[in-house]
Image (cartoon, rainbow, N blue to C red):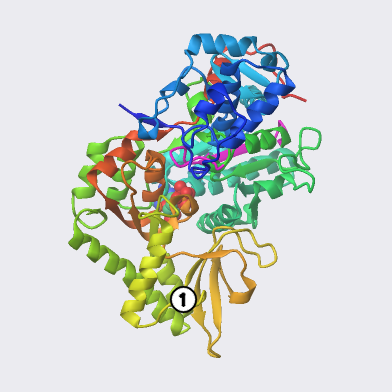
Amino acid sequence: MTAVTTTSPWADPGDRRRVLGATGLLARFNHPEVLAAADVHVAQRLGSLAEETDDEVLLAVALAVRAVRTGSVCLDLATIGALPLEDDLELPWPEPTAWTAAVGRSALVAQQLLRLDGTRLYLDRYWREEGQVCDDLVARVRRDPPEVDAALLEAGLERVFPGEGYAEQRDAARGAAVRWTTVLTGGPGTGKTTTVAGLLTLVAEQHELLTGRPPRMALSAPTGKAAARLQEAVQEATERLSPGDQQRLGVLHASTLHRLLGWRPDSRVRFRHHRGNRLPHDVVVVDETSMVSLTMMARLLEAMRPDARLVLVGDPDQLASVEAGAVLADLVAGLEDSESSPVAALRRTHRFGARIGALADALRTGDGDAALAQLRAGGGEVELVDAADEAAMTRFRDEVADVAVELRRTGEAGDRSGALAALGGHRLLCAHREGPYGVGGWNRLVERLVAERTGVTHYDEWYAGRPILVTANDYDQLLNNGDMGATVRDGDGRLRVVVQVGGATRELATSRLAGVETVHAMTVHKSQGSQARVVSVVLPDEQSRLLTRELFYTAVTRAQERVRVVGTEAAVRAAVSREVQRASGLRERLRAALAEPPSGGVTLRE
Ligand SMILES: Nc1ncnc2c1ncn2[C@@H]1O[C@H](COP(=O)(O)OP(=O)(O)OP(=O)(O)O)[C@@H](O)[C@H]1O
């Protein structure tokens, strides 16, 4: 059976505060495993606003606040009582049917501070956003398709995606060319970016024929790092097109979704572009859509012109957004079975070896036996290092230290390209930040091993060979949260940091870098959207709530050539069987809406 965790890695497991004034069920559930103090406070506040005193209703409110805090869009009253808790914590969960009825009678629901849909309970804002995403998408899917010249399209498809090797991408692009909305999914290396570049050429060709001018195209991604990577990947894919197609596309720039929609100094969730001031673009591509939250998707959809094409690209099996929602996975599940499905799935891998692909597939489908079989099959591309085998662990630590020693050697010699090659050659990924399996512990261990080997200790924050991770967007230095760099010694003895930003290399004085951390090891969450030749994944203890299928899959698929998993069989099985489930009603709303006949010309909300 599949275990389910609703815990998000962004929940605050450290919040052990208890609310002194809490009574009844709120006090009972105010436990680090369930309700944080903030959840209780919000429930008390809303309760007093609406003069709601029912203990079970107030518990539901606090749990709805908790749900959003841990990545869900809503709270499902029917299933929340089955939440697996550590320490076999026994809690007096209300009986779901009576509980739902009590919530339904509440003044909070009557006053629309909360919304109840079946057994799903929402804070009003998320209910509205989910409804808006559903309505806007259904309207887009049902809109009359864009005009295309079929003969020109077919000729273009044959030119851009020639032969059997591109058949899957050709089909995906053919479908996308005749739709306003496309959800293009696929694991790493399945050719998504190649498909996007080819599709944009074809769309440009059609647009020019129809309007006599080139289309306005926008490339975007949820983070600066992902946007830089998208721009680089599209550039590379474009270079493989014919000169005529390259000219048609021109030079495309990518930006963050926030920047595309237009920052507003007065709001984090409202933008310059919205339903009353739509984006001017004819085509908008969003990469890494798995990292897009429900709120951001709502803002994007309302800012899109109905007659502009939207291409959402991503891998729905990866970890979802930091904020509430698992929108990409919901869109795929909610739309893929409909007659007018805009989902195009790429399955054939063009990049990594068969073994990594097979391991990723086993993880994606939750097949623990197949995952272990791949990990134990030998051959080097995929490997399991048994955490209980001391000799194997010593070898592993030595190999990790080898990378750091190479960074140190190249860094001391001022060898920029050597240092960047060492940095990009290997990535050590952990689930946790701290603890015995965490990033902090590994960083300290590696520094100690390097000190033992080289005799140089790391008392200073900066040292030649220090690998760094940029942890906040730095607009002055044009650095993105997630960029990585290596510290090298200059001819004059001073330390400099070389950072790979997109396709270019930048060099900065250490004093100019504010938000950085040492990155001999990094968390899987931070590794999202980046890749390395060799990846080592240190699995935490099998009890760890962070150990999920999505986390494991995301980690493994960062590898281009080789992946090494460090852990026990029990940890591998625990990871594969534990899926993150974020409660949301989006997929059901989409299915229900698409199952209904169109109500005489659906139009986009104005
Ligand atoms: N049909 C194909 N035949 C051969 N090689 C291909 C094909 N499609 C893409 N490739 C190559 O495979 C690699 C991965 O392609 P691409 O970057 O488009 O995939 P992706 O899904 O966007 O990858 P990711 O999201 O992991 O970066 C590239 O080197 C690309 O040139």
Residue position marked by numbered label 1 in the rendering: 417
Tell me if residue 140 comes above or below residue 54 in the rendering.
below
* 474 or 273: nearer the viewer: 474
Where residue 49 appears, x then y in whole percent? 74, 23
334 or 394, which is in the foreground?
394
* Closer to us: 144 or 218: 218
Q: Is mark 1 within 8 Å of ligand 1?
A: no
Q: Is residue 43 above or below residue 166?
A: above
Residue 379 lies in what quarter of the image? bottom left
Q: Is residue 317 magenta?
A: yes
Q: Quadrant of the N terminus?
A: top left
Q: Amino acid at mark 1?
A: Ser
Residue 529 lies, in percent from the top left, at 50, 52
Visible residue check, residue 186: yes
Q: Is residue 220 left or right of residue 383?
A: right
Q: Regarding mark 1 in the picture, which secondary structure is present there?
A: helix
